[in-house]
Image: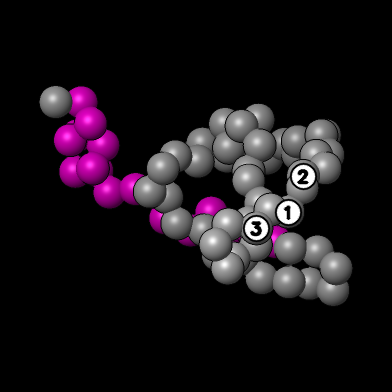
C-alpha cells in the first residue's frame, strides 16, 4: 500500500453497552482490505488514535464461507 488515502473522515463516538465505539468507514476498510475476523493493533500517540492491521483472518474461515 505505497499510496496514501487522501480522505479524512469525521466519525461520531457512540456508546454500546459500557464501551465507546467508532466504526471504520467502508472506504478505509476497502483500501486496507479489512474483513471480518482480521486483527488490528491500536494505540494512542498524543491526540491521534493509530490503528494498524496485524493479521488477516484464517484461511479455513474464508473457505468455510465459500461452502
Which image quarter is the N terminus in?
Answer: top right
Q: How dense is the environment of label 1, judged by Cα within 10 Å: few (below 14), some, or many (20 and up)?
A: few
The residue at 41%/42% (across/down) is 36
* Quadrant, the C terminus: top left
Depth check: 24 or 21 in front? 21
The stretch of residues the image draws in magenta is 50-66
The residue carrying mark 3 is 15
Query: Whole-Å distance between the Cαs marked 3 and 1?
Result: 7 Å
Q: Are marks 3 and 2 in contact (CB under 8 Å)?
A: no
Residue 41 quadrant: bottom right
Residue 65 falls in which quadrant of the image? top left
Residue placed under numbered mark 2 in the picture: 11
* Label at residue 13: 1
Are the residues at dot 3 and dot 1 in contact (C-beta closer than 8 Å)?
Answer: yes
In percent of the image, x 77 and y 44: which residue is there?
11
Q: Decide: marks 2, 1 in contact (CB < 8 A)?
A: yes
Amino acid at each position: 500500500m505505497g499510496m496514501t488515502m487522501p480522505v479524512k473522515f469525521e466519525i461520531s463516538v457512540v456508546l454500546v453497552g459500557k464501551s465507546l465505539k467508532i466504526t471504520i468507514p467502508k472506504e478505509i476498510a476497502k483500501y486496507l482490505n479489512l474483513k471480518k475476523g482480521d486483527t488490528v493493533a491500536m494505540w494512542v500517540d498524543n491526540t491521534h488514535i493509530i490503528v494498524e492491521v496485524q493479521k488477516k483472518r484464517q484461511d479455513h474461515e474464508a473457505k468455510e464461507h465459500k461452502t
